[in-house]
Amino acid sequence: MAVSVTVVDDSKISRKMVIRALPPQWNIELTQAENGEEALAAYRDGKAEVMFLDLTMPVMDGYQVLEQLQKEQLNTFVVVVSADIQPEAQARVKKLGAMAFIKKPVKTLDIQNVLHEYGIV
Amino acid sequence: MYCTNTVSFKPASKTTSMSIQPYTEDQNDALQEVVNIAMGQAGDSLARILGHFVGLSVPRIRLVTVEDVIKTVTDMVDENAEISAVRQAFSNALRGEAIVAFAQAGADDLADLMGYDTDLDQSAEQELLLEVSNLLVGAVINGISDTLKTDLSFSAPSLMAQRTPLDQVLVPEQLSWSHALLMEVNFTVEDRDFHCHLLMFMTEGAIDTLRDILDEFMDSI
C-alpha cells in the first residue's frame, strides 16, 4: 500500500529537490504544502504518514508545526529539512519530536539513510 | 587592494543600463533558496566560533536603484547607533561586494563572546571584525558557489567604516552602478547584544549572469 508523504516548504524549488531525492522504488502518495497550516491540514486529511518539514516558512513555521503535533499527540514521522544546520537547531527539533534532520541542499543519500535507518523503505 | 572607504563596483557605469529585467517568480524562488542555504552555512560557522546558537533572519532580496539604496539599506539594517562595516569583493562567475555591518553594541559583545578582554583597543577590535566578516562571507560565498556549482572567489576583508553613522557608509554619488541586486540577512545571538547584518550587492552584469545560472540550476533539478 502506498505511504502518504507530505513535503512542506514555501520554496517550490526546495520541494522539488526533496521530491527528486526520494527513492524511486518507494510507493508513495505525494502531497505538497507551502506552510505549516497546510501541512497540518494535510496530516488531518490522512496525507502525512511521513512529513518532510522545512523550518523557516511564512504563516506557520516548522517549529510551530512540531509543537502542534506534540501538543495534540499526533503521530507522524517527521524529517526536518533545513538550511539552518547548527547542531543546536538539530537538537531543538528532535526535542520537539522530529525523528531526523537533513541538511539543505538535500542529498539523495541523506534521505535514503534516514528511511533505511527507520525501516521505512 | 581595496582601500577606498565607499562601495564602488566594476565594470559598470550609470549610463549603461536604462532598466533591469526583473527575475521571474521561479528565478526568485531559486535565488531565495540558494541564499537561504548559504546564509545557513554562515550561521553555522558563526555559531561554532561563538559557542552560541545563532538566530538567522529570512533573507531579504531586493532589486535596488542607486537612488534608493541608502533608504533600503537603512530600513534593513535599522540601526540608530553608529556601525562598523567590513567589505569583501567577490569575483569570477559573479562579481559583487559583500558588506558585514556590526552595530557598536554588537561589536563590543563580540569580544566577550569570543573570550577576549572586552576593552579592546581599536586595532584589536578591527581584527576581530575582519575575522568574523571573513568567516561569514567565506561561508556564504562557498555556499552559493557549491549550491549553484559555479566558481566564486573573494578578496581579503577590509574595514570600510568604524563607528560611523550608517547613512554615511554608502555614498550614492560615488557608486558606479544604477541597479543592484541586494541580499540581506541578519545574525543574532539569543539573550546577547551581538548582532550583525550581511549585505551582498551584485550589479548590472552580474544580475544578468545570475539569471542564466539560476535557470541552469533549476534545469538541473
Image (tube, coloured by chain):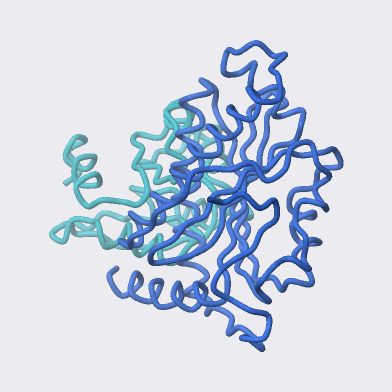
Chain colours: A cyan, B blue
Judged left or right of residue B90, residue B108 is right
* Quarter holding residue B56: top right
On screen, residue A91 above or below A42:
above
* Quarter holding residue B204: bottom right
Q: Quadrant of the C terminus of chain B?
A: bottom left
On screen, residue B2 above or below B132:
below
Q: Position of residue A79 (x, y in %)?
A: 36, 42
Q: Nearer the viewer, residue A103 or B167?
A: B167
Q: Residue at x 50, y 45 (%)?
A: B137
Q: Position of residue B163 (x, y in %)?
A: 79, 36
Judged left or right of residue B157, residue A121 is left
Q: Nearer the viewer, residue B53 or B76?
A: B76
Q: Residue at x 34, y 36 (%)?
A: A100
Q: Residue at x 68, y 76 (%)?
A: B178
Q: Position of residue B39 (x, y in %)?
A: 50, 47
On screen, residue B109 above or below B78:
above
